[in-house]
Image (cartoon, helix red, strand yellow):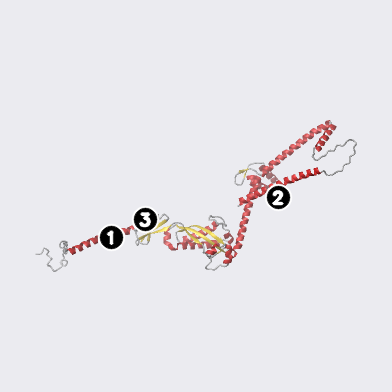
Amino acid sequence: MSENPDANNPIPPELLGRAPAPAPEPDRYSMDPAQQSLADALRITYRLLQVVMLLLVALFLGSGFQTIGASERGVKLAFGRISSSDVTPGSVWNWPYPVGEVVRVSTAQQVVNVWESFFPRLTPDLEKRPREQLANLKPTLKPGTDGSLITADGNIAHTRWEVAYRIDRVTEYIDNIYQPDEKRIVRAAVERGVVRAVAELEIDGLLKQVASVEEGGAGSTGALSTRVRSIAQETLDAARSGIQIEEVILTDKMAPLPVYKTFSEVTAASSRAAQQREKAAEFRLHTLNQAAGLANGVLLSAINEYERASELGEPDRAEQILARIHTIIDGETVTDESGREVSVSGDVTSIINEAKQYRSTVIAEARSAATTFQAKLASYRENPEVFLANERRMAWEAFLANSLAEIAILPPGTGLSILLNRDPDIIKELERERGARQADQTLQERVQLQQDAMEAKKMEDNGN
């Protein structure tokens, strides 16, 4: 009799409401060798498959590790949505694709050249030629090919620009900007800014731009470049691009080719005039400093006030100002416009000192003459004949001391007939003295000319 009561029952146990009997465990010792080898192979394959699956899962999860460079920022995505923004440089992990992704964005400075948008299309050979020759080689502009700008006064002009920018707001950049179109978007924004900024400026103001990127007045590149940068940045911000323009540089500018030479002549003349004005200002300052030292401004202002008071008929005020001028010239310390304490020096001091010395000399000579006269007057009153004889003797001695005087001694009672003729020795002596005086005068004039030339060259070198 079988140990299993359901072994001979044709009705399945499930229909009888009983649980089915467990399947008997195969006895590997009761299998034949072929079945036993097949079972072992299947078991080993299943274990290997489990190991491989675990390795694949580990590799899948490990592929989520990414490295963000020092000049990059990252954004983590999960199922297409941003889960973490502005991830700093370093090693980060996120769910691998297609579940998630780490998008890396370079924040290094990028450069875009706007060279052809507003400039005539030139071949490499024409680029090397002087601009004056291009007027003959390319006398017209072809619409759609050659770029240009319209200035505020209705003239045509050409410019080239260079733009430096970087990605500042990574989340906005990823949401709104298609990376392959990044430079085209920046270029379009800058072109819009250039068109608007140049349309507000006349052509003379544009062509007088200096090569500088610092902010300045209407004649400096800084003002125009700042305006272009502001308009372009407004455009990019309105598009929520996340791009920040750092610098806009005007690299080249020129008038239309047919009139380029005329504009160049005007610009050159203006430049020469500016240099001459600068040299004149330097010469004026040098002359004033040489005349009155650091106090030249105070002294010149006082002189102008004196002349104005005299013209307005204000004698009292003019006298007060004149007294102040004399005080300044005498060396009193005064305060200039910048608050410095200065005093008169230079030629004014030398002239004043010479005048004072001359005055002292004249006074001393006059006093000496007066003293001599008083002494002679006393001698004359005591004995007029002796005094006159003494004066005649001194006058005769002074006359005979002249190197040109000749003395002839005749015996008493001898008649004398004198035939006057010019003494050749005296004539030679006179000619020699005159030649010496002329030589001295010529030498002094030559020295003065050399000094003036050296002074002019020094001023020119300082101006350059």
Which circle's residue, 3 or 1, is located before the other in the chain?
1
Q: Which of the two residues, 233 or 460, is positioned nearer the viewer here?
A: 460
Element type at marker 2? helix
Q: Position of residue 256 (x, y in %)?
A: 57, 64
Give the quarter of the image for residue 154: bottom right
Q: Position of residue 348 (x, y in %)?
A: 67, 44
Badge nearest the viewer, 1 or 2: 1
Which amino acid does the dot numbered 3 rest on?
A: Val
Q: Which of the two residues, 21 or 461, is positioned nearer the viewer here?
A: 461
Badge nearest the viewer, 3 or 1: 1
In the image, farthest residue toward the left: 1
In the image, residue 257 above or below residue 88: below
Within 10 Å of disc 3 (Cα), the crowding (few <14, some 14-19, many 20+) is some
Query: Which residue is label 2 attached to?
Result: 311
**How far apart in space, not on screen, are marks 1 and 2 (Cα)?**
110 Å
Q: Are marks 2 and 3 in contact (CB under 8 Å)?
A: no
Q: Does any portion of residue 400 appear in the rendered image?
A: yes
**How far apart in space, not on screen, are marks 3 and 1 (Cα)?**
26 Å
Number of the label disc, if any, that sits on residue 92 = 3
Within 10 Å of disc 2 (Cα), the crowding (few <14, some 14-19, many 20+) is few
